[in-house]
Amino acid sequence: MSPNVSDVEEAINDTDFSASFAAIAEHDNEDVFRSHSGTHSVTESSDATPVPSSGSALDDPVNNVLELPSSAGNYLHLDVDSRLPFGRFKHWLGKKLGMDTTQFVVIKHYREDDKGYECNSKDDESVRNALDNVLKLGVKLRPPLKDDEKLIRVLQFDLDEPNRENWRVLFECPASKQTLVGDLMLQCIHLYAEIYGQRLPLNQVRLREMSTISRPVKAVLNPADTLDCRGSQWSNNVYFQIITDERLIGQPGVPVLVRRFRPSTVEVSAIQEALVDPNASNQMESLAQSVSALSGIPVERLAFTEVGFRSNWFLLESTCDVGRMLCCQHMYLSHNLAWPN
């Protein structure tokens, strides 16, 4: 790993060259190893404590991994032979972490501030070649990605927080274009229980995505579809919604986000969900019935409009102007979460 891994000539004693890695911190669930230039001799490092690895091939000094006394907690300082097969190095890390190598991935960092890149090196590739020019290494606790997979970021869908920028990232899930939305939902439920300690039933969650002016999409992903239905941006963020309204849990229908607008006071209510029968001959009538049941207001007193992305338009006009623009005294509802911001 030039310049961080020594070049080994055939005529030189094999026991005198190793690549050095030192752990510096834990960051974003990632144990980080920093690469240092220079070499460390296995035979001359009197303060190094060898950590044995299984397998006769690793018992040879050429293939040793040394854990240095400066290691502490998540800071792990290692002396690694540059010719060690990467698979054996990863096996050693697995033994150290107490888990199988299929449960974590090695992340390469080329700069101090980069996001990190998954190391897809083959097991028989040497540490020198696998980690060429790498500044530091990290370990993330998740299965390795397959060739056709990407990590999909999952954020919490929060009706009580109108600013989408404040929605928290829950976790990331590996998936491919052919992954069923329903399978991704099961992954999310499992991770949510594992990380946040709450086991949710399948009928209490939805996976959503967000429309933009240039990219209108279905608000709720169908569990029977594959992620390929999202088009070229199939690996974009998805939004994990926990249904808290007991009236809606497990109920059929397409959820529509609505809020009440009072023109006389230029006020809007909190966002609520109404369910629309997708098979209804008149879906606007179905929406009106659902909103009427939700609000207690008769259907004949309801009026609807779809709000665009000019989120603060009503604040720019006087109350009288708004009344003239609406030309009605009815309740005003919107299914567009982006309004108002």
Image (tube, helix red, strand yellow):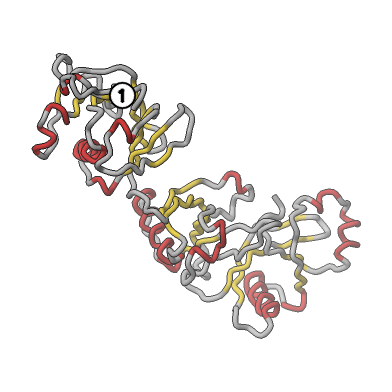
- Disc 1 designates what residue? 5
Q: Amino acid at mark 1?
A: Val
Can you tell which quarter of the image residue 94 is in? top left
Q: Is residue 126 left or right of residue 169?
A: left
- Front one among 73 and 243: 73
Q: Residue furthest front?
A: 11
Q: Is residue 88 above or below residue 62?
A: below
Quarter of the image containing the N terminus?
Answer: top left
**Residue 183 coordinates in the image, percent (x, y):** 40, 64
Q: Secondary structure at mark 1?
A: loop
- Front one among 63 and 300: 63
Q: Residue at x 50, y 74 (%)?
A: 251
Q: Is residue 224 above or below residue 197?
A: below
Q: Residues within 10 Å of mark 1 (few under 14, many from 20)?
A: many
Q: Residue at x 35, y 41 (%)?
A: 140
**Residue 215 coordinates in the image, percent (x, y):** 66, 59
Q: Is residue 254 left or right of residue 70?
A: right
**Residue 202 coordinates in the image, percent (x, y):** 41, 66
Q: Residue furthest bottom?
A: 281
Q: Is residue 107 left or right of residue 101?
A: right
Q: Residue at x 13, y 34 (%)?
A: 58
